Amino acid sequence: MDPQTTKKLAHLLRSGATMLDKTCPECNVPLFKKGDKIFCGSCNREVIYVKDDQEKIEVESQLLHRQVLHQLKNVLYGKIDNLTQEIANTPMEDIENQLDLLSKTLYVISQIETLHEKQKSETKE
Ligand SMILES: [Zn+2]
């Protein structure tokens, strides 16, 4: 282990993380646990334990769903940005369309956030 990694691990221990008796599949450095997160002490990658292949598939698809929703949210925020510009450049009496789109976009974002919250509480169980 190089001195820099050793330093990192010492820092993690001081910050209250627990060192586990398992190592990172990528770099073989011990894994750490802090709160309900397990991660590699060197590459900081989060590690998720699975019982079997079935659980692995479930966890992977959950992560994929989360990623897709995250992307969608970013795209929608981009649209809100566009709409804001448009509204700024349009006379008050003509912005009804934009406001309608804005309200729909915000609604979808709030739906995505509700889904996120739901997923979070499901993974905690
Ligand atoms: Zn690692």
Image: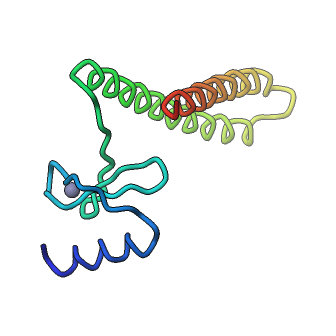
Q: Position of residue 119 (x, y in %)?
A: 52, 28
Q: Residue 88 at what x, y percent from top left?
A: 74, 42
Left or right of 10, for residue 17: right
Q: How is the image coloured?
A: rainbow
* The quarter of the picture showing ligand 1: bottom left
The foreground one among 36 and 76 is 36
* 82 in relation to 107, above or below: below
Q: Residue 36 at what x, y percent from top left?
A: 46, 47
Q: Nearer the viewer, residue 96 or 4?
A: 4
Q: Is residue 9 above or below residue 90?
A: below
- Report the residue that reaches farthest toward the front: 21
Name which residue lies at 38% across and 70% down. Answer: 12
What residue is at 45 percent from the left and 71 percent from the top?
A: 15
Q: 65 and 42: which one is in front? A: 42
**Residue drawn at the location 54% of the way across and 38% of the way down:** 78
Q: Up-down: is 65 above or below 22?
A: above
Q: Quadrant of residue 79?
A: top right
Task: Give how far across and how far down residue 29 sits, in percent.
Answer: 18, 61
Residue sitting farthest toward the right: 93
59 left or right of 116 in image:
left
Name the quarter where the N terminus is drawn.
bottom left
Q: How many marks?
A: 0
Q: Which residue is outermost to the top?
A: 54
Answer above or below: position of 73 versus 96.
Answer: below
**In which image quadrant can residue 21 be found?**
bottom left
The one nearer the camera, 89 or 39, is: 39
Q: Residue at x 41, y 25 (%)?
A: 65
Q: Tell me: 2 left or right of 104.
A: left
